[in-house]
Image: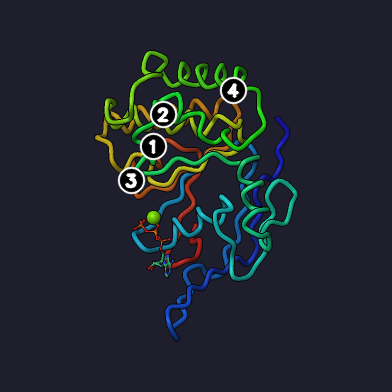
Amino acid sequence: MQKSVLCLMEGIKKIYKIGEEEVEVLQGINLSIERGEFAAIMGTSGSGKTTLMNLIGCLDVPTSGHYILADREVSRLTDDELSVIRNEHIGFVFQNFYLLPYATVLENVLLPTLYMELHKNDVEKRAIELLRLVGLEKRAKFRPNQLSGGQQQRVAIARALINDPEMILCDEPTGQLDSKTAAEIIKLLAEMNTLGKTVIIVTHDRNIASHTKRTIQIKDGAIVS
Ligand SMILES: Nc1ncnc2c1ncn2[C@@H]1O[C@H](COP(=O)(O)OP(=O)(O)OP(=O)(O)O)[C@@H](O)[C@H]1O
Ligand SMILES: [Mg+2]
């Protein structure tokens, strides 16, 4: 596959105002991520990993700087415009899974399609295929509390894939899991990368980061390597 840039950040700053005080959480991030990359973002607690991840994922906008995602400047978009971009390009996986407790596994996977005009049978078929991909086709009618942590995270990964995004962003995806289950989840994410997805994982676990092809090290809001 020809290399092409999916994310390009230039001079990205994020400043939070708390009362009179300004906290510069990201201090001029320059970052380029190519299509098909499998990368880890590492750094100590409070270094700005989640803040950066939220910007990469268009969950938030920077205070200043430029961010070009899939050839589009997205750093000044409104919330509605950002949600369209997210739906098109990005799937999310979080530490706490964020599954709906009263919905079945299948319904959870279908959640991101709820507000899209898609053919119900087609998306259901796709959701079941994704559950098969993550090894949970027999759990489609279960509720999240009837699953192990690793299984819940697999549901979250299937949900992240339902809109066929180019990129999957994971914030501490293994933070709640034991090391064996964590290794299985990383293996699954590596498989998604092999299938062509750009996969970015925020972690402070060196073990996890060692499975990726690139490590982006962040310290006090700046990329140091
Ligand atoms: N909404 C907010 N308002 C004010 N300050 C914030 C806000 N969100 C984050 N911060 C500050 O930004 C800094 C970076 O936070 P961030 O959550 O990005 O760190 P992190 O690297 O993800 O840490 P962890 O490993 O603990 O998850 C912290 O000092 C935090 O207090
Ligand atoms: Mg964080």
> Seen in the image, is 95 located left or right of residue 88?
left
Looking at the rendered structure, the number of numbered marks drawn on it comes to 4
The kind of residue on which mark 2 rests is: Val
Sequence order check: which comes first, mark 4 or mark 2? 4
**Spatial distance from mark 4 to mark 1, Cα to Cα?**
18 Å
Three-letter code for the amino acid on which mark 3 is drawn? Asp
Between 44 and 91, the residue placed more toward the observer is 91
Q: Which residue is mark 2?
A: 155
Q: Which residue is mark 1?
A: 99
From the viewer's perspective, is residue 28 above or below residue 195?
Answer: below
What secondary structure is found at the residue carrying circle 4?
Answer: helix
Disc 4 designates what residue?
123
Q: Which residue is mark 3?
A: 205
Q: Is mark 2 within 8 Å of ligand 2?
A: no
Work out which quarter of the rendered image holds the N terminus and state it.
top right
Q: Secondary structure at mark 1?
A: loop
Q: Picture coordinates of residue 49 (x, y %)?
A: 44, 57
